[in-house]
Image (spheres, rainbow, N blue to C red):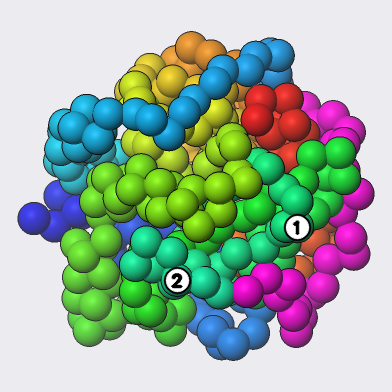
């Protein structure tokens, strides 16, 4: 079943803008949102009031697998696919971290790749770290901007270091950035097939077993957080809604498919950093529905994807907000993980 049938009106427009569904066959490049442009996949992509409450909740890996499986069986594209698009509410406070200078082009990733739980995984962070972050990348996979962000999370907070794991859910077949803009029938067909092959509920169902596999290989990790970008943000909403989740906190960066109904089910402290392209109405309702500690903030002059593959780090303003985004994430995690 096509994901596109679940989007109507403004949510369909936002889904097209975020690359979650292909536009109608009559759509031409001239009519696509201005934030979509072609890019070389081997270079940096060149597109164009918060509340935090102190709260810590223990989550353990000894959850019941049958309950996990039963929970994730309820997650289908039919009941999880709604979409999102916001002006800035600058509620940023100083982060307790020291982020190194961001490299605009030609970044050399600091981590290594391991095979974990049947998935190639980018792993970064100090050996002595006892806290872990599972990162769900966006549809473009291992882009330099995404890997640099993971390295920032791993080492920038000197008082609380993390080991970050990014599994390749796409098995070496991420969405080619050449498919953007999806302005031909072939691109539209390919993009639709990609999302049918990789719906967020199917990935969310795999996360608990992946964490167990990581824990077996890295028993030094004692507590967990999860962060997702774009498509991965939806995965975070689903995973943290599980009553047996092992995660103590979740973070969604420019998330796709923002659904206020998801927020009602989330069991852990959650931060959501929105771009100007997420629906302000949906983000506001999502924030209102979160029952636990939260930090919801909109970076009003940034595009969907500014903290991951679509970030133009050669633009000084984008680079500044990229850094501020990761500072905000680190401060939130320091309070809750």
Quadrant of the frame with the N terminus: bottom left
**Helix, strand or loop for disc 1:** loop
Q: Name the quadrant containing residue 35.
A: bottom right
Rendering coords of residue 50 (x, y %): 69, 22
Residue 301 or 108: which is nearer the viewer? 108
For residue 19, side relative to residue 103 (left or right): left
Identity of the residue drawn at 56% across and 74% down: 113
Asked which secondary structure carries label 2, the reply is: strand
Residue 126 - label: 1
In this figure, what is the number of numbered marks? 2
Residue located at (20% from left, 54% from top): 4
Q: 251 or 2, which lies in front?
A: 251
Q: Which residues are magenta?
A: 87-112
Classify residue 336 as left or right of residue 198.
right
In this picture, residue 136 sits left or right of residue 76: right
- Say which residue appears at 44% left-offset and 40% top-offset: 236
Within 10 Å of disc 1 (Cα), the crowding (few <14, some 14-19, many 20+) is some
Percent coordinates x, y for residue 213 in the rendering: 41, 54
Q: In the rendered image, which residue does mark 2 sit on? A: 115
């Amino acid at each position: 079943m096509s994901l596109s049938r679940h989007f109507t009106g403004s949510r369909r427009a936002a889904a097209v803008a975020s690359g979650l569904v292909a536009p109608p066959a009559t759509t031409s490049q001239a009519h696509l949102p201005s934030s979509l442009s072609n890019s070389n996949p081997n270079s940096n992509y060149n597109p164009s009031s918060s509340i935090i409450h102190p709260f810590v909740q223990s989550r353990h890996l000894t959850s019941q697998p049958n309950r996990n499986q039963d929970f994730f069986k309820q997650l289908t594209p039919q009941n999880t696919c709604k979409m999102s698009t916001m002006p800035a509410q600058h509620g940023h406070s100083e982060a307790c971290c020291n982020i190194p200078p961001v490299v605009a082009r030609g970044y050399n990733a600091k981590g290594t790749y391991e095979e974990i739980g049947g998935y190639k995984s980018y792993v970064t962070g100090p050996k002595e770290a006892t806290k872990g972050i599972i990162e769900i990348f966006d549809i473009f996979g291992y882009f330099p901007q995404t890997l640099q962000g993971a390295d920032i999370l791993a080492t920038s907070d000197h008082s609380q270091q993390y080991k970050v794991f990014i599994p390749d859910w796409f098995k070496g077949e991420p969405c080619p950035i050449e498919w953007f803009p999806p302005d031909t029938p072939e691109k539209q067909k390919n993009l639709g097939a990609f999302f049918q092959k990789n719906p967020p509920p199917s990935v969310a169902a795999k996360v608990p077993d992946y964490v167990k596999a990581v824990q077996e290989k890295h028993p030094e990790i004692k507590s967990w957080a999860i962060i997702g970008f774009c498509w991965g943000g939806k995965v975070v909403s689903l995973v943290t809604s599980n009553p047996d989740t092992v995660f103590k906190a979740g973070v969604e960066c420019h998330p796709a498919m923002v659904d206020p109904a998801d927020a009602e089910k989330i069991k852990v402290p959650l931060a959501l950093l929105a771009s100007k392209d997420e629906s302000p109405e949906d983000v506001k309702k999502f924030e209102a529905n979160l029952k636990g500690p939260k930090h919801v903030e909109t970076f009003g002059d940034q595009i969907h994807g500014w903290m991951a593959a679509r970030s133009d780090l050669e633009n000084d303003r984008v680079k500044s907000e990229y850094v501020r985004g990761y500072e905000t994430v680190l401060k939130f995690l320091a309070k809750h993980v």
